[in-house]
Image (cartoon, helix red, strand yellow):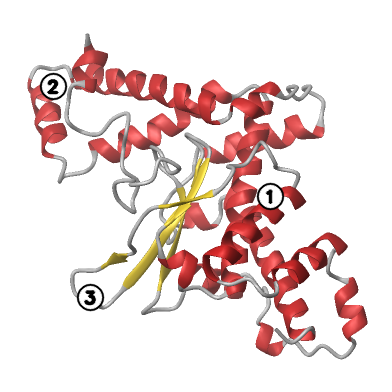
Amino acid sequence: MLKQQYENLSIGLPYISIKYGKPNNKANGTGNSQFSHINFKAKNPLMDSSIVNGNYNIALLNIKNNAEALKEIPRGLRTIFKELKDETGENFVHKAYSKLRKYMKLDGIAPDEIGRLGPDEVTHSGAKVNIEGGYNPRNNSISYTDGFFNRLEKHEQLNFLAHELKHAEQASKIIRSGLISQYAGTWAKFQVSGVLQNPLNVPVQMALKKARENGKLSEFVKGAMFACKDETLKDMTKGHANTLKLPQYSPKSIGYKEGTNYFESYKTYSNNIYDSEYKNNPIEIEAYAFGNQIEKHFQIYSQINKF
């Protein structure tokens, strides 16, 4: 009864809009995302993070020996960068994504393509334009708003693509560790919490008030969690169908250890890129490090080859 009551509310569950707004591309789907956020009127917080964490600044790279510098770039990446040389804009994004996915051995595991979420967000004052998007583990998709495809430099696009592909890889290891049900429950908790705490969602706030007045608040929230987890698990099962066909990791394997560690990290995951919980979460630390590494390799390669 409570499940049905919750689903009948006009609050968007199980289809909850992510921070960047209501999805307009089925590739994005539903639920929260591990999103990337780019502000063109201020320093890019993701790039700032790479500098703060002691990564590189391409302007300071003093490459004295090109041959030695190129040796530091994996052969597979050198081939990819060479093939991407003359690509630009959306063509670059899609080709780079396809090649990175194959390089990471994620064909059939990561999403088949990058989805579009529509126009970038413009603040009310017009002072800032934000590109938003990211990886959605609920239905295994990666999507970005329009500016990602035509406003970023190639090295930035590569960084973010690699970052989100790392998240797809992490999700696949959680699922292959036999934790898809628990994974769905964790994401359902995030989604329900976000909806219930949104003061602008009038139908939800009215339902919460009524439940509180009737002494049914705890029961109401549990019903919401049950409904959302059920739908999230259905979406995850569909979105990760290929991963579920792969053999599960044995409890003593490295993959199982990685998958269980990732799941533990997801329990404290935060979507706020300015939160310490976000910056210090092992999942994001790994994804940032990988994205920055790919970007650094591309910057060195393109500088040496002058393109």
Q: Is residue 40 left or right of residue 258?
A: left
Q: Which mark is residue 45?
A: none
Question: How crowded is the residue under tag 2: few (<14 C-alpha within 10 Å), some, or many (20+)?
Answer: some
User: Residue 152: horizontal and vertical position, in percent?
Assistant: 50, 73
Verify CB contact (< 8 Å) between mark 2 and mark 1.
no
Q: Is residue 274 left or right of residue 286?
A: left
User: Residue 78: horizontal and vertical position, in percent?
Assistant: 81, 68
First along the sequence among labels 2 and 3: 3
Look at 17% across and 26% down and name the residue there: 9
Q: How far apart, in angstroms, are the residues tagged by discs 2 and 3? A: 40 Å
Figure label count: 3
123 w.r.t. 259: above or below: below
Look at 73% across and 48% down and name the residue there: 102
Q: Which residue is mark 2?
A: 211
User: Residue 219: horizontal and vertical position, in percent?
Assistant: 24, 16
User: Residue 300: horizontal and vertical position, in percent?
Assistant: 75, 79
Pick the quarter of the image with the C terminus. bottom right
The amino acid beneath tag 1 is Arg
296 w.r.t. 288: above or below: below
The amino acid beneath tag 2 is Ala
Pick the quarter of the image with the N terminus. top left
Helix, strand, or loop for circle 2? helix
Q: How far apart, in angstroms, are the residues tagged by discs 2 and 1? A: 47 Å
- Viewer can see residue 38: yes
The amino acid beneath tag 3 is Gly
226 w.r.t. 10: above or below: above
Q: Which residue is mark 1?
A: 101
Badge nearest the viewer, 2 or 1: 1
Picture quarter containing residue 49?
bottom right
Q: Which residue is mark 3?
A: 126
Badge nearest the viewer, 3 or 1: 1
